């Protein structure tokens, strides 16, 4: 796979989870990360230092890092006392380098060098953007964290999303990576707050359509309260095609592993259910659906995540179907 360029696009925990598996197969891996997060530690640094939110970027850097385990613990350390309470060390490290070099892109580059990152991590845009959403009751909400809260608290459906300012310029290296990509992976991650924001950046959808990489969508295992209530897999695809264009997605990867009943019950009580899908409907639209046991329960918790290694294996299976040489790394 040394000559195969893979671009993975998203945000949140889903993208970093997938990267941990993919890095075992190739270094020609680029993570394109949304920068609309305005909550928590990232939101504070964004407001007070006028910088891009570092949280999702940090998680992707750590996912691709080839360094001592203690370094990951340090970069993920969150202070619990004093004026730094709630702040993450890795975010502060990126903020410090941003101040030293006067460039968030340079801060990412230097952090990647320190942590011996395999591949690249790129912000989708370097402009200061806010995510906006129109809900089904006609209310407009600005700010990613505010949108998520309204989805959870009021269980209102999102009808449309956009960035403010509209059509921000993409980071030039992102467009370059899209045109060089053989494979583009969307997700896993929150539909409206992790995946779609990347497609709202100017020329992003156009570049994907024109460059024609093989596009893979990794389906979420569960719906998200408010944000995707009652959404099946076709609904997810319809939303993505609204912003990307029809007929662009080639493959969808879905989990077919049974969720333990006790954990499933907790999710249902919180308003989340497994994402349902019908292969025939998607196949009729020219999309190939690959099923696999992808479930992972985070140790010591009841949180459902994708299994990094198994997800990567399915993506490699797709590369084999496309006759890309993968045997040297398997």
Image (cartoon, rainbow, N blue to C red):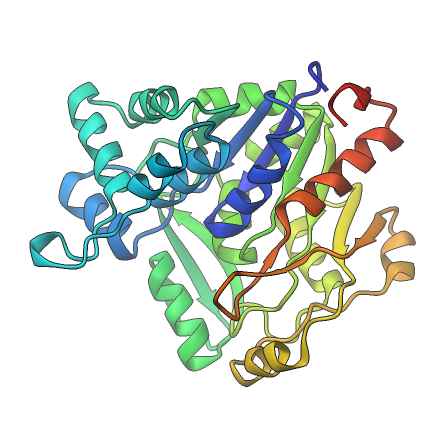
* Horizontal side of residue 111 vs 248, given as left or right: left
Position of 161 relative to 5 (above/below): below
**Image location (x, y in percent) of residue 116:** 42, 22
Res. 248 visible in picture: no
How far across and how far down the image is residue 161, in percent?
A: 48, 56
Residue drawn at point x = 41 percent, y = 47 percent: 163
Q: In this view, does 107 lie to the left or right of 14?
A: left
Residue reaching furthest to the left: 82
**Horizontal side of residue 134 vs 256, given as left or right:** left
Q: Where is residue 13 in the image (x, y as percent from the top left)?
A: 48, 51
Q: Is residue 274 above or below residue 29?
A: below
Q: In which quarter of the image is residue 19?
A: top right
Q: Which of 284 and 183 is in front in this view?
A: 183
Q: Is residue 134 above or below residue 43?
A: below
Please say whether residue 119 is visible from this viewpoint.
yes
The image quarter containing residue 154 is bottom left
Q: Which residue is drawn at 54% across and 50% down?
A: 14
State the quadrant of the C terminus: top right
Residue nearer the viewer, 87 or 159: 87
At x 78%, y 62%, the residue is 256
Q: Assign the N terminus to one quadrant of the image.
A: top right
């Amino acid at each position: 796979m040394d000559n195969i360029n893979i671009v993975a696009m998203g945000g949140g925990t889903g993208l970093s989870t997938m990267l941990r598996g993919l890095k075992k197969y190739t270094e020609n891996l680029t993570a394109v990360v949304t920068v609309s997060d305005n909550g928590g530690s990232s939101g504070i640094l964004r407001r007070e230092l006028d910088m891009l939110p570092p949280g999702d970027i940090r998680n992707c850097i750590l996912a691709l890092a080839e360094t001592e385990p203690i370094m990951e613990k340090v970069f993920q350390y969150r202070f619990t006392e004093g004026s730094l309470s709630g702040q993450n060390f890795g975010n502060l490290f990126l903020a410090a380098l941003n101040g030293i070099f006067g460039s968030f892109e340079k801060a990412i580059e230097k952090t990647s060098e320190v942590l011996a990152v395999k591949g690249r991590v790129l912000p989708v845009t370097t402009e200061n953007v806010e995510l906006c959403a129109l809900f089904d009751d006609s209310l407009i909400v600005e700010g990613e964290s505010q949108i998520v809260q309204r989805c959870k608290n009021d269980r209102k459906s999102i009808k449309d999303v956009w960035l403010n300012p509209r059509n921000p310029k993409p980071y030039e290296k992102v467009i370059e990576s899209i045109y060089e990509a053989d494979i583009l992976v969307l997700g896993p991650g929150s539909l409206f707050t992790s995946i779609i924001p990347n497609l709202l950046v100017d020329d992003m959808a156009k570049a994907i359509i024109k460059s024609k990489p093989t596009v893979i969508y990794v389906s979420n295992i569960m719906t998200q309260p408010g944000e995707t209530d009652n959404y099946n897999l076709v609904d997810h695809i319809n939303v993505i095609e609204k912003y990307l264009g029809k007929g662009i997605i080639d493959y969808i990867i879905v989990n077919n592993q049974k969720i333990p009943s006790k954990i499933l019950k907790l999710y249902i009580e919180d308003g989340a259910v497994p994402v349902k899908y019908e292969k025939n409907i998607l196949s009729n639209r020219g999309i190939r659906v690959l099923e696999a046991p992808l479930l992972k329960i985070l140790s010591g918790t009841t949180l459902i995540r994708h299994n990094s290694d198994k997800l990567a294996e399915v993506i490699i299976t797709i590369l084999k179907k496309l006759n890309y040489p993968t045997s040297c790394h398997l």
